[in-house]
Image: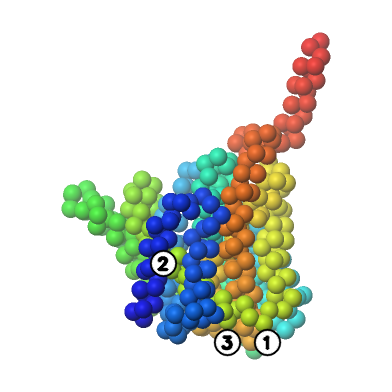
Amino acid sequence: MGWQITQVAIVLVVFAALSGRLRGSAITPAIVFVAIGYVLGDQGLDLTGSVLDAGTIRLLAEVTLALVLFSDAAVLDTRALTREAAIPARLLGIGLPLTIVVGALAAVVMFPALGVFEAVVLAVLLAPTDAALGQTVVSDQRLPSRLRQGLNVESGLNDGVCVPLLFAAVAFAELAEAPTFDGGIVVDLVKEVGIALGVGVVVAIAVALVYTASSRRGWLDEEWGQVVPLATAAIAYTATAELGGSGFIAAFAAGLVYGRSLGAPVAHHTTRLMEETGGVLSAVTFFVFGATLIGSGVTDLDVSTVVYAVLSLTVVRMLPVAISLVGSGATRPTMAFAGWFGPRGLATIVFMLTIVEESALPGTGRIVQVATLTVLVSVVAHGVTAPSLTERYLRWYSTSAEHVALETHVDVALIDRRRGLWHRHAADPK
């Protein structure tokens, strides 16, 4: 294990030295770490060693996702979300379910060997998005706030939403006769979610009370305050897992309550270390993904696997997003932009490893192969296209009526009609 840690540490140092130069370019951290991992991994120089087994990778990925879920929930800007709730609500309430339905239907047609619920598992596994893979999009202040906020909130929340859906799909898929209803599955699922929500809320409230009391008395050192959210996420995740609940849901719920209990300024201030730690662990996860998973997951590809991976990133994602944004004031370019930037990353990797470790689905091999290829294509395609497509969208947006509609919630067609009337009046002052 020592040499593997050495390799990862060297890669981190090298990337840090070049990070400023690469910022905003088409070469994203995920692309770099996946590429280097592949070169050093099983299919390249084979320097990582067999110590990086599925269990080790899963542990790393789970810790990373738990931290990301907590920090995303803790720093969620509820005021901005209240003002601009329409787009994220549409993406999560309409776009996400439709994405899962379309993805499952496509899987049933393209992979006849998969059962219906295995197809649902694949669709749910590929539904969560990872904003970090297209960081240029969600961080560029020139883009309309509602669009950036919508994509960012969607990415932050859909991981947590998909966790219980994935567990339910796997549970039904593991039944001897998948279509047969078993009330015990529903009971177990409700129990698992209930435990997670209960533990997450209780832990977050208790920690917030301790933090507040200590801070008021002047007992809390500012540097140690950065440790509090990390410890809170760890307590919520591990305690819930021991009690038989979903640690991911617990981490997400704890983050929401933590952020609301302490207030946005304190939550933002105290989660800086957690966000940086999550970013580093995410980079390491992509390194390990490149070193160990790509070699086994992207071999012996057939046409169906490749086509489904492409469809997952295009039609399966973009059509539901377009449908969800009908009536929001968004026009086709914005629908296409929002639909394309739904990259697949960390959550898909964690869900995939969870299925490998905990389930006994006959179609696990196919599910892993499709998911691995989809993440790989997404890492490259979304990373490379983010800067250029953002600039292209901004050039269009600056001359479009939609920049008024998105900020004022006025229908684009009405703005165009008003512009037409203005031009006619200007041409004919009478």
Q: Which residue is mark 3?
A: 360
Where's residue 115, x and y in %? Answer: 70, 81
Residue at x-position 24% and y-position 57%:
224
Of helix, strand and loop, which one carries label 3?
loop
Q: Which residue is mark 2?
A: 11
- Label 3 or label 1, whichever comes before in sequence order: 1
Which one is in front, 175 or 58?
58
Residue most extreme to the front? 45
Where's residue 351, x and y in %? Answer: 54, 73
Rendered position, 244 above or below 263: below
Image quadrant in which you'd find residue 373: bottom right
The Cα–Cα distance between marks 3 and 1, rounded to whole angstroms, is: 14 Å
Amino acid at pointer 3: Ala
Q: Which mark is residue 177?
A: 1
How many numbered dots are placed on residues in this image?
3
Residue at x-position 39% and y-position 47%:
264
Of helix, strand and loop, which one carries label 1?
loop
Amino acid at pointer 1: Glu
**Circle 1 residues within 10 Å: few <14, some 14–19, many ≥20:** few
Q: Which mark is residue 59?
A: none
Where's residue 215, x and y in %? Answer: 23, 50
Which one is in front, 18 or 50?
18
Query: Does residue 388 show up?
Result: yes
The Cα–Cα distance between marks 2 and 1, rounded to whole angstroms, is: 48 Å
- Label 2 or label 3, whichever comes before in sequence order: 2
Residue at x-position 64% and y-position 87%:
362
